[in-house]
Image (cartoon, rainbow, N blue to C red):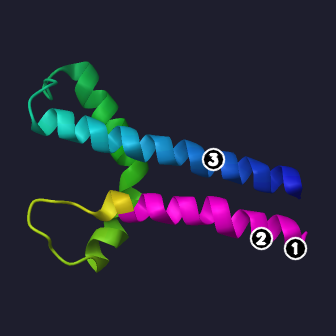
Amino acid sequence: MHELLGFISYLVGLYTYIVVADVILTLLMQFNVVNPYQPTVRSIAQGLHAVTEPLLRPIRRILPATGGIDFSPFVLLIGCYFVQSVVIPNLQKLF
């Protein structure tokens, strides 16, 4: 059971990096640092959005509108860190 929880912790850490990459790429595209019409950039952005949107969409529905700033990735990252540092270690102690 410890190996499974360690693997889940690894996946949560990997997902954290994916969310950070999505946020950075989105900012780079909004500030025209990278060309969003280039096929490689567009495919990477679509792949990152496809992975992150299923968890970001419910958070965006709950959070109030804050103008042009999207705080949902930060809430998701806090949730990932909570799962990785509190939930998984307590489950390992339980088993």
Instruction: Indicate the secondary structure of the residue bearing disc 3.
Output: helix
Question: Which is closer to the viewer, label 3 or label 1?
Answer: 1
Main SS of the magenta part reads helix
Above-or-below relation of 94 to 22: below
Residue 90: where, in percent of width, then height?
77, 70
**Amino acid on which disc 3 is placed:** Leu
Identify the amino acid type marked 2. Answer: Asn
Residue 39 place in picture, x, y as percent: 22, 21
Q: Which residue is found at the position 19% from the left and 33% from the top? A: 28
Q: Is residue 88 above or below residue 43?
A: below
- Magenta residues span 75-95
Magenta stretch encompasses residue 35? no
Residue located beneath label 2 in the image = 90
Q: CA distance from mark 3 to mark 2?
A: 17 Å
Counting residues from the start of the chain, the first of labels 3 and 2 encountered is 3
**Looking at the picture, does residue 75 appear above or below residue 38?**
below
**Mark nearer the N terminus (3 vs 1):** 3
- Residue for badge 3: 11
Q: Categorize mark 2 by other alpha carbons within 10 Å: few (<14), some (14-19), many (20+).
A: few
Q: Quadrant of residue 2?
A: bottom right
> How many numbered circles does the render carry?
3
The quarter of the displayed image where residue 76 is located: bottom left
Q: Pointer 1: what residue?
A: 94
- The reply to whether discs 1 and 2 touch (Cβ–Cβ < 8 Å) is yes
Gap between marks 1 and 2 measured at Cα: 6 Å
Q: Nearer the viewer, residue 3 or 71?
A: 71
